[in-house]
Image: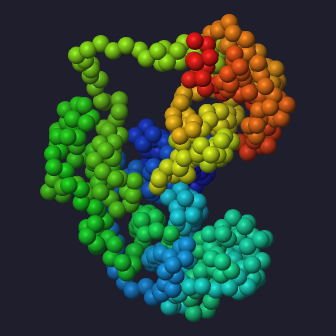
């Protein structure tokens, strides 16, 4: 998930009262989490990177509620003198554009936060692509993107003296995080102007070209491992500046190129009635077009134009989703499904339903999480079973999970301020030995929690479904569980799962204070053991 936050006064100041008053209502359209007090906190799903700032969110709100209509973009072509000498190393692609306008002033922190967010999410934590922001008026052209040695001296944006890149790589916070992305062997690729280094992509920018509240003209550079990632970050960054009324200048002609026509990508829809059919309700063409316009699309002569910054839109399904959001999911009329035959419950599904009732009867609350998860959660399980998602939208959803209990730790993390004890369970799919299986996992978070506490629940659970004896073998190798406070669950000598108390180091990684205990059971193995 992506979180943006700022003081309520600041957000009202940069958006204006009319747009500010619509933030909560718009959350019901887009489905983001909204919290308000002295501070505004908004939590987005990672599939809408164009909304990851208060400026661009305000632009979307303005268009949706008719406060703002801006289908003409302040864009021109110009020559940016930059040479690229990197055509083979890990980040061979570089893009750049200039944004000219008024002093950035109060929007500075929002500008920086937005570009950090898109570099982290769309750029995969800067691995695939990253953005650099520079004060254009402090540059001396031409620019060069080329190699340099690690002993070259450079002054980072947050320091006041030059140091060698080799030293910066082991002492500076950003250096330690990103030096491996910046260097190739014993050399690094740097962005330079006539007077020296202005950036070590994707690690650090220089102090000499650092932006501040008085900056009014910007140079934005995007370095990437592939063209598509670089293109997405460039379009998103352009959108931010255009939303503020800046003139955008670049020399690729991207907004005048074939895929776009002054900021909109034409979408061919052979039969618009397919949209109504997909939603399941009768819709007039004029209503469909109106919903799309409210979501920022351009409608011209019955043709649909996708906004250039909507890098998440890949086809017909995304249009249907946007229309459904604009219309409101509550306005979709339910229809009875007509079946020509009668179905019957799968035996294993019936078994899962019985187990769910048992867990609820023991006082546990059922949750549901995604089969797709992140590296952090997968790292608590069997790494050999980890499968990556090809070209994921976000690092939050980049791998298939191999256990359920890490999702429960995230649940406890999100609900750390709720009352205790917290007792939850989930029945869901996981990856095991290159195939999907179903697991039951239950967990407890409480200050008085411990291994013996959850062991009593496990015993009650097993007695509810079988008269067979169980045994806990203390040789469990799961590193997330404290050694000696957990083990493998054997039922009739068949290993069906594990139980244990979560290690304090793991609790710290999930920002948890209270002890957490878990049980995770393979339902296929359990079903076989009790038959």
In which image quadrant can residue 178 be found?
bottom right
- Which residue is at a point 66% across and 40% down the rendered structure image? 381
Is 37 on the left or on the right of 219, as rendered?
Answer: right
Residue 201, given in percent of the width and then of the height, sits at: 59, 74
- Return the residue nearer the eye: 63 or 182: 182
Residue 137, given in percent of the width and then of the height, sits at: 53, 85
Asked if residue 214 shows in the view, the reply is no
| 519 relative to 319, above or below | above
Residue 453, given in percent of the width and then of the height, sits at: 79, 19
- Which residue is at a point 62% across and 17% down the rendered structure image? 529
In which image quadrant can residue 382 be found?
top right
In which image quadrant can residue 423 be found?
top right
- Which residue is at a point 68% across and 25% down the rendered structure image? 495
- Return the residue nearer the eye: 467 or 208: 467
| 157 relative to 53, above or below | below
Is 304 on the left or on the right of 173, as rendered?
Answer: left
- Which residue is at a point 35% across and 29% down the rendered structure image? 330
Is 451 on the left or on the right of 524, as rendered?
Answer: right
């Amino acid at each position: 998930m992506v979180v943006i936050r700022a003081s309520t006064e600041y957000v009202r100041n940069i958006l204006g009262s009319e747009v500010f008053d619509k933030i909560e209502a718009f959350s019901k359209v887009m489905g983001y989490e909204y919290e308000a007090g002295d501070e505004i906190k908004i939590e987005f799903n990672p599939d809408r990177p164009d909304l990851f700032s208060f400026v661009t969110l305000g632009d979307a709100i303005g268009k949706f509620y008719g406060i703002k209509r801006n289908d003409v973009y302040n864009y021109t072509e110009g020559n940016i003198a930059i040479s690229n000498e990197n055509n083979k190393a890990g980040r061979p692609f570089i893009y750049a554009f200039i944004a000219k306008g008024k002093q950035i002033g109060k929007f500075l922190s929002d500008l920086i936060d937005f570009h950090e967010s898109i570099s982290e999410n769309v750029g995969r934590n800067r691995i695939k692509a990253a953005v650099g922001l520079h004060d254009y008026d402090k540059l001396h052209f031409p620019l060069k993107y080329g190699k340099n040695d690690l002993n070259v001296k450079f002054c980072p944006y947050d320091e006041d003296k030059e140091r060698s890149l080799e030293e910066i790589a082991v002492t500076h916070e950003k250096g330690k995080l990103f030096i491996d992305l910046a260097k190739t062997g014993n050399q690094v690729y740097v962005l330079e102007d006539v007077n020296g280094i202005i950036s070590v992509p994707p690690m650090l920018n220089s102090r000499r070209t650092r932006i501040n509240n008085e900056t009014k003209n910007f140079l934005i550079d995007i370095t990437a491992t592939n063209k598509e990632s670089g293109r997405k970050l460039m379009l998103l960054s352009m959108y931010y500046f255009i939303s503020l009324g800046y003139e955008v200048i670049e020399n690729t002609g991207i907004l005048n190129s074939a895929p776009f026509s002054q900021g909109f990508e034409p979408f061919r829809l052979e039969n618009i009635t397919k949209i109504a059919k997909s939603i399941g309700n009768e819709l007039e063409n004029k209503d469909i077009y109106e919903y799309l316009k409210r979501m920022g699309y351009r409608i011209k002569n019955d043709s649909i134009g996708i906004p250039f910054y909507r890098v998440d839109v890949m086809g017909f399904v995304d249009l249907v989703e946007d229309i459904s959001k604009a219309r409101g999911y509550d306005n979709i009329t339910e229809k009875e499904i007509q079946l020509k035959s009668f179905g019957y419950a799968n035996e294993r599904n019936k078994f899962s339903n019985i187990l769910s009732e048992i867990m609820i009867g023991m006082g546990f609350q059922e949750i549901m999480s995604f089969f797709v998860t992140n590296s952090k959660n997968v790292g608590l399980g069997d790494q050999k079973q980890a499968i990556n998602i090809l070209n994921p939208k976000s690092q939050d959803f980049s791998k298939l999970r191999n256990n359920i209990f890490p999702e429960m730790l995230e649940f406890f993390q999100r609900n750390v301020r709720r009352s205790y004890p917290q007792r939850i369970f989930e029945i869901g799919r996981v990856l095991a030995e290159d195939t999907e299986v179903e697991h039951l996992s239950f967990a407890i978070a409480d200050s008085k929690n411990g291994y013996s506490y959850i062991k009593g629940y496990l015993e009650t659970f097993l007695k509810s479904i079988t008269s067979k004896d169980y045994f806990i073998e203390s040789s469990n190798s799961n590193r997330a569980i404290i050694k000696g406070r957990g083990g493998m669950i054997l039922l009739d000598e068949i290993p069906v799962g594990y139980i244990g108390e979560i290690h304090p180091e793991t609790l710290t990684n999930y920002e948890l204070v209270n002890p957490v205990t878990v049980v995770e059971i393979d339902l296929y193995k359990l079903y076989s053991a009790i038959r």
